[in-house]
Amino acid sequence: VMGSLVIDALDEDLCREDFLLSVRFGQTRRQVVASKAIGESLHFPKLPDGKVHHTVRVDLLTHTGTAWLVLRPGADRYELTFSGDSLKGQKGLTVRANPPAEKVETRSPSKRRVKEGGGGTG
């Protein structure tokens, strides 16, 4: 049963192009630019039937930085660098594209960090 949540009102201070509303219900997340959110229907695969309480998470996000990734044939590892005033310098991350299932490592974020000042796309 498909359902939707409709944003009826939003404080004027939150109606900004650089804010993003992110709504999560179950395993589904929908996002909308805050300035365009009023009247927007956010569709979800299943909404509560009214018989049980359910939690819906709503996050207000702001843009911190952007990095672009161009997937290249034969390449499977990429280094991305973000920079911006709120980041206090450059920050990066490493991405693996389509790693074989048997080689995927799962580590907590605190155990795997990118060196500060690393850079570029690799």
Image (cartoon, rainbow, N blue to C red):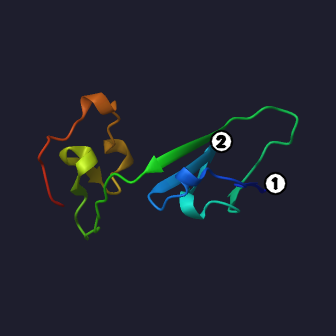
Q: Where is residue 18 in the image (x, y as percent from the top left)?
A: 44, 58
Instruction: Give the percent coordinates (x, y) of residue 92.
Output: 22, 48
Residue at image coords 35%, 56%? 98
Q: In this view, does 60 lie to the left or right of 43?
A: left
Instruction: Calculate the distance from the C-alpha at mark 2 to the C-alpha at mark 1.
Output: 14 Å
Query: Is residue 89 visible from the viewing direction of this image?
Result: yes
**Label 2's element?**
loop
- Front one among 10 and 119: 10
Q: Residue furthest right?
A: 51
Identify the residue under disc 1: 1
Kind of residue sitting beneath label 2: Gly
37 over 59 or under it: above or below: below
- Residue 57 lies in quadrant: top right
Quadrant hosting residue 109:
top left
Give the numbered dot on residue 121: none
Residue drawn at 33 percent across, 42 percent down: 104
Q: At 29% from the left edge and 67% from the top edge, which residue is drawn? A: 71
Which of 62 and 79 lies nearest the eye of the viewer?
A: 62
Residue 120 image point, x, y percent: 15, 59
Left or right: 85 as drawn, with respect to 104 = left
Please tell me how crowded label 2 is: few (under 14), some (14-19), or many (20+) other residues with Cα within 10 Å. few
Residue at (22%, 63%) from the top-left corner? 75
| Residue 33 in view | no
Residue 33: % across, % down: 53, 60
Number of other residues with Cα within 10 Å of mark 1, as a class: few under 14, some 14 to 19, many 20 or more: few
Instruction: Indicate whether 7 appears above or below 86.
Output: below
Amino acid bearing label 1: Val
- Residue 26 badge: 2
In the rendered structure, the answer to whether residue 104 lies left or right of residue 18 reads left
